[in-house]
Image (cartoon, helix red, strand yellow):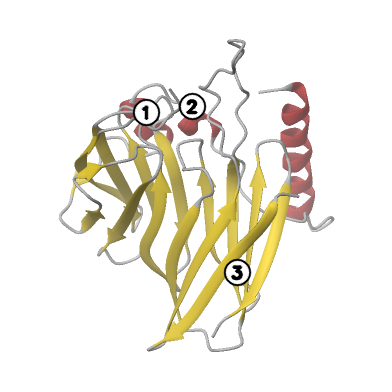
Amino acid sequence: MTQRLMERRQILTFLGTLAAAGFVLPKMAFANWDKVAFEAKTMDEALKALGAGTPATSGDVQIVASDIAENGAVVPIQAISKLPNTERIAILVDKNPSMLAASFDLTPETIPEVTARIKMGQTSNVVVLVKADGKFYAASKEIKVTLGGCGG
Amino acid sequence: MGSPMKIRASVKDGVTEIKVLMGHEMETGQRKDANGAVIPAWFINEVTAKLDGKTVMQAQWGPSISKNPYLAFKVKGGKAGDKVSVTWVDNKGDTRTDEAAAT
């Protein structure tokens, strides 16, 4: 993390505190990027950083994706939660150097399913993590990759 | 500044489906250039989507999202003519907002 990014983070945190005190309205009121989770080196670390601990496997968390990805640079994934009060959906790729690909925070109006395209460096388990009613659930699917997508 | 996003929002049966295609390199920071130097990580790390002025989705992304990211999701409610706005911020602090009307 460069010095400039650290300063930006500090400024944003400061503005956030001011906003909470009712002074300044930041242009984008947004939780700071979860650096610890995104830079985790193992799946357990990433899950822990997300507050998930050991999530319960649930059939109500579904991953719609091809079993085989022809191009690891672009792997479409649809992550679906059938659980009520889904607040957050995250997509993780077990064997990627950066295993947390994305985390989506939903409102009560958002239907709990998202489609995104991820990079996969090699055949790996893709994990979809769901936070619903304050608890964490997960599902996992192995996707085979014929041509790795992280740039080699 | 980035290149313009393509946003499509269509309302059907009380649900607004929003699809966005963003233009961004999404450089992982894992690649090296021809001289062997690491190409620095450069990727969208925050996305906010609003429907009719209300935030309906906020996402944090990492470099594992594909280049020229595609995102699709659905929101309950919405009607034709509602404004859909999508904003991204990347790890260099660059940001872009695009809007479209739901059909």
Q: Residue at x 30, y 28 (%)?
A: A122
Q: Position of residue A87 (x, y in %)?
A: 41, 59
* The quarter of the displayed image where residue A25 is located: bottom right
Q: How many marks?
A: 3
Instruction: Provide the secondary structure element on which disc 3 rests.
Output: strand
The circle drawn on residue A96 is 1
State the CA–CA distance, disc 1 to disc 3.
31 Å
Q: Are marks 2 and 3 on the same chain?
A: no
The chain letter for the residue carrying disc 3 is B
The residue carrying mark 2 is: A39
Judge by depth and name the residue closer to the eye, A146 or A79: A146
Q: Tag 2, which secondary structure?
A: loop
Residue, far front: B34
Name which residue type carries label 3: Lys
Residue A45 picture location, percent across and down: 37, 26
When the figure is inspected, residue A39 is found, relative to residue B69, above or below; the finding is above
Q: Nearer the viewer, mark 1 or mark 3?
A: 1
Q: Circle 1 — which element?
A: loop
Badge 3 is on which residue?
B50
- At which x and y percent is residue B93? 73, 40
Q: Dot 1: few (<14), some (14–19), or many (≥20) neighbours within 10 Å?
A: many
Q: Quadrant of residue A124?
A: top left
Q: Is residue A79 visible?
A: yes
Residue B30: percent from left, percent from top: 51, 22
Pick the front one: B35 or A108: B35
**Which residue appears at 31% of the width and 55% of the height?**
A79
On screen, residue A79 above or below A13? below
Check chain identity for marks 2 and 1: say if they share one: yes
Residue with the most extreme top position: B36
The alpha-carbon separation of the residues under discs 2 and 3 comes to: 28 Å
Separation of residues labelled 2 and 1 (CA atoms) = 11 Å
Residue furthest to the left: A59
